[in-house]
Amino acid sequence: MLKKILVAVDGTPCSENAACTAFAMARRMGARVVLTSVVLKPRHHSDWAWQHFVHQKTETQELLQRWARIGETGWEISVDSKLLEGEHVAEEIVAYAETEDFDYLLIGTHGRTGFDYSLLGSVAERVARLSSIPVMISRRKDTDPRWHLGEAEHAKRPGEAEHAKRPGEAEHVKRPGEAEHVKRPDPEHAKLDGGTTHV
Amino acid sequence: MFDRVLVTTDGSELSNEALQVAVDLARPMGSLLLVLHVIPDLFYPNTKPGVTSTEKAVQHEQARDSSGILNDAIQTLGYSHAKPLTLEAHNERVADVITRVAHEENVDLIVMGTHGRQGFDKVLLGSVAERVAHLARPPVMLVRAGQRAHQKDKRAQANLGK
């Protein structure tokens, strides 16, 4: 049976990494990916709140479409997207994942520790506590071009990894000497992937 | 990118569920599965100096049991591309040992069971999985207790509906 992976994105680098992890997994397992994001419903009735809500919905829709495109072209897998509306982010994600019978749920986290940890309630942690399906919490990875462009796309390298995330910007032209920035900084990791440095 | 998957076990029902999830993941991706059992340091944090001989004996006993736990785990897996690992925590938390192993072994994913306690229980009990999720660099997959049973129920219901 084809596995289904749900990945929650919100436009932060951490969630982008979660999306890339999901794509990589799907590519290896032959799974289907559904991207999701939650837009909070306005809690009071005012023109401003409504406008903000509508604006956020369009923005989020664009974000989802952009990432679906990255998955389809960059990783050559089938990606769907689903915009959720609700009052609580974690609850919405978990409810959707459970009703649609997903096999895995992926979400990014900042991975804060110490004081920050106690200060900030983490959505990822809440999702992990609520969900009855396996939750994968993904940390921000170092800027590896494969993660942001996709493995299939990586060979072609149309732009810089960082810039692939922001389609509003002009297409980045690679200059000589720039390769250092996109190299995986961790040499051990490079070794693990068969010694490829992707330059 | 998912060449090495680390899964932790302590021989409990919950960790068996985590193992099953890990195998389901590793099989299609052809990953090497590292099955880790960490023997907790019973006397950490140690408030008194020295450990009595009885306490040492208990710890020793635990260490002896562990090889059985791992062998059982790997037997039930039925996944040949697996490597057993046993470590003893000395003056440190289990979660810290798991995190260290994950980094040393360069794993791409950690799969762990968690009780997913909420409310008062959450305050009361520190979770190993939670600490690993916070400290480890690779992604951490948390498997909640009773997940598989829950999924089976759901599938069964879906089949009845058809």
Image (cartoon, rainbow, N blue to C red):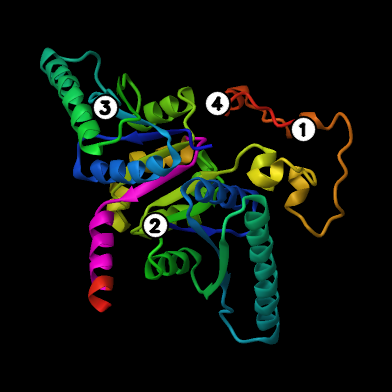
Foreground residue, A61 or A154? A154
Q: Residue A124 colored magenta? A: no
Q: Amino acid at mark 3?
A: Pro
Helix, strand or loop at label 1? It is helix
Marked residue nearer the N-terminal end (4 or 2) = 2
Q: Closer to us: mark 2 or mark 1?
A: 2
Q: Which residue is mark 3?
A: B40
Marked residue nearer the N-terminal end (2 or 1) = 2
Q: Which residue is mark 4?
A: A192
> Split into 4 quadrants, where in the image is the C terminus of chain A?
top right
For the residues labelled 3 and 2, the Cα–Cα distance comes to: 31 Å
Q: Which residue is mark 2?
A: A103
- Is the Cβ of the residue at disc 2 closer than 8 Å to that at disc 1? no
Q: Are marks 2 and 1 on the same chain?
A: yes
Q: Closer to us: mark 3 or mark 2?
A: 2
Q: Residue B154 colored magenta? A: yes
Q: Amino acid at mark 4?
A: Leu
Foreground residue, A8 or A48? A8
Residue positioned 20% across, 37% down in the render:
B76
